[in-house]
């Protein structure tokens, strides 16, 4: 049974940067697409970014495109989200996830992911 654990969240001023990490354990996810989602208080969980199992292709929500970069390191079994030019509206709990649908290269729906981390809080102050 695989597990995912996020780290790297925190409090940052608007315009700052953070890098989130998601460490996998219990199994490897090297053949699975992975993604980042976020959930702000009172809002539904929303897609942020996804990456194919190979790392060769990525997809981003329009709200983060050009500011966030998703990447993965198979040797470390770790997923990353580099966030630049952060805005107060980026404040949320960020979750990493691994897809269980090998037929979907870049899944954007939460229902297509079978493994989830516990989340890490990102707070951006204005």
Image (tube, grey):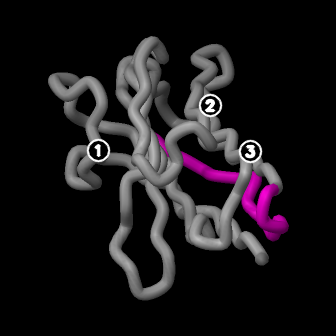
Name the spot of residue 126 as percent of width and height, x first.
Answer: 77, 77
Residue 12 colored magenta? yes
Residue density around tag 2, few if under 14, some if 14–19, many if 20 or more, within 10 Å: many
Residue density around tag 3, few if under 14, some if 14–19, many if 20 or more, within 10 Å: some
Residue situated in front as seen by the camera: 57 or 110 = 57
Tell me the number on the disc at residue 78: 2
Secondary structure state at the residue bearing disc 3: strand
Say whether residue 23 is visible. no
Say whether residue 87 is visible. yes
Mark-to-mark CA distance, 1 and 3: 21 Å
Q: Circles 2 and 1: CB distance less than 8 Å?
A: no
Left or right of residue 83: residue 4: left
Residue wearing tag 1: 108
Q: Residue at x 36, y 26 (%)?
A: 32
Mark-to-mark CA distance, 3 and 2: 12 Å
Name the spot of residue 67 as percent of width and height, x first.
Answer: 62, 42
């Amino acid at each position: 049974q695989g597990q995912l654990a996020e780290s790297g969240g925190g409090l940052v001023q608007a315009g700052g940067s953070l890098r989130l990490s998601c460490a996998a354990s219990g199994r490897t996810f090297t053949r699975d697409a992975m993604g980042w989602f976020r959930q702000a208080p009172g809002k539904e969980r929303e897609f942020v970014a996804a990456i194919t199992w190979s790392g060769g292709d990525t997809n981003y929500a329009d709200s983060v495109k050009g500011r966030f970069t998703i990447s993965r390191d198979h040797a470390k079994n770790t997923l990353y989200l580099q966030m630049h030019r952060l805005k107060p509206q980026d404040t949320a709990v960020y979750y990493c996830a691994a897809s269980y649908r090998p037929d979907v290269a870049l899944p954007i729906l939460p229902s297509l992911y079978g493994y989830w981390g516990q989340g890490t809080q990102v707070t951006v102050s204005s």
